[in-house]
Amino acid sequence: MSDPEIELKDSIFRFLRVEKKFINASNVFENLLENRFIRNHYKFSEMFCKERYLNRHGIRHALKSTLYALRLFDILDDQKSLKTSFEFGFYCYSGLCNFLSDQTCTVILASTFCHDVYKYFEESHNQPAALIAHEIKGDLEKVYPEKSDEFIPVIERCIWNHGGKKPATCVEEAIVILADGANCAKDRLLGNFSEEEIMQNDKKPIEYFSCQDIEKVQVLRGENIPVNVNFFINGKAAWHQISRFNERLKNSKLSNYVEIFVYFNDIPTPILRDSYMDSG
Ligand SMILES: [Fe+2]
Ligand SMILES: [Fe+2]
């Protein structure tokens, strides 16, 4: 039987080493995978979520979100307008603007991989992001001795706003917001609970039911707009996740670059594109 965790790690390494030849980002990823603090906290996060009937917030969620983030980065890195312009309201003190691709990729990878380490902390609190950034500083310094001080504030900001509650201030942050939101299909469920169990125990049962109604989410290169995010759904509760993703998209400030498509029961025609979402 294949192990989803191993498959996800392999896909990430394949992207970094074979497709992009980002050896530095790949070495940082290797260090992060071996970081005991990250591993132990993700184990704890997963236990915490299981006890509360919440969806996955452990290493598998971290890896899957990271893979989505790398796909987004790969497509958006080609977009010259994102690299030079302030028109999107990004500070551009970082990232696609000032860093090289391997460096931007490292920041996105580290932020997405570590974003939920402190799931059990208050999400709105600033401290977890700073603590995580502090814990992974050594992993970055080994590969980027001169750059890690520049990376840390960006990583902190990405982790702090990974839920996309505030408008993104740089492209990396926007990518982390969208990658986290895209990981909302049924493989996000931690257990096979009955409806009664979820309704009785979960404080927000819609989070469980909505992921259960999504078969898969794809992040692909689009034809007209650079990125297509395809939701394949099989039930009505899925709309909760789709509208949440749409809110994230607005705060990411990447609406001109990312288009949402929704497919119902594998019918090849999308039943919705995001242009309809705003009109109603
Ligand atoms: Fe989170
Ligand atoms: Fe998350």
Image: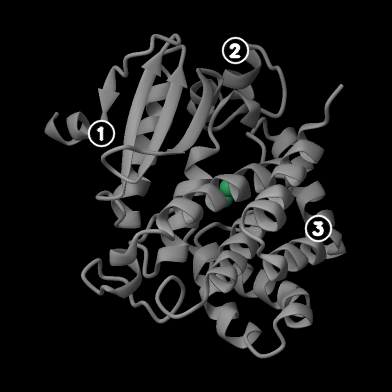
Q: CA distance from mark 1 to mark 3?
A: 36 Å
Residue 48 visible in this rendered orientation of the protein: no
Looking at the rendered structure, the secondary structure element under dot 3 is helix
Residue 20 in the image: state x and y as whole percent.
Answer: 61, 58
Could you tell me the amino acid type at mark 3? Answer: Leu
Can you say whether 212 is above or below 265 in the image? below
Q: Which residue is mark 1?
A: 274
Indicate which disc residue 195 carries. 2
Q: Are there few (<14), some (14-19), or many (20+) residues within 10 Å of tag 3?
A: some
Determine the residue positioned at 61% across, 46% down. Answer: 67
Instruction: Tell me the quadrant of the picture where the C terminus can be found.
Output: top left
| Residues at marks 3 and 2, CA–CA distance in whole angstroms | 35 Å
Residue 188: image x %, image y %?
Answer: 63, 31
Amino acid beneath label 2? Glu
Crowd tier of the residue under label 1, counting other residues whose Cα lies within 10 Å: few below 14, some 14–19, many 20 or above: some
Give the percent coordinates (x, y) of residue 147. 62, 86
Question: Residue 108's spot in the image, x, y percent?
Answer: 56, 63
Q: Which residue is mark 3?
A: 33
Residue at left offset 59%, top offset 24%: 186
**In front of the other: label 1 or label 2?**
1
Q: Nearer the viewer, residue 122 or 183?
A: 183
Q: Say whether residue 200 is visible.
A: yes
Q: Is residue 45 left or right of residue 156?
A: right
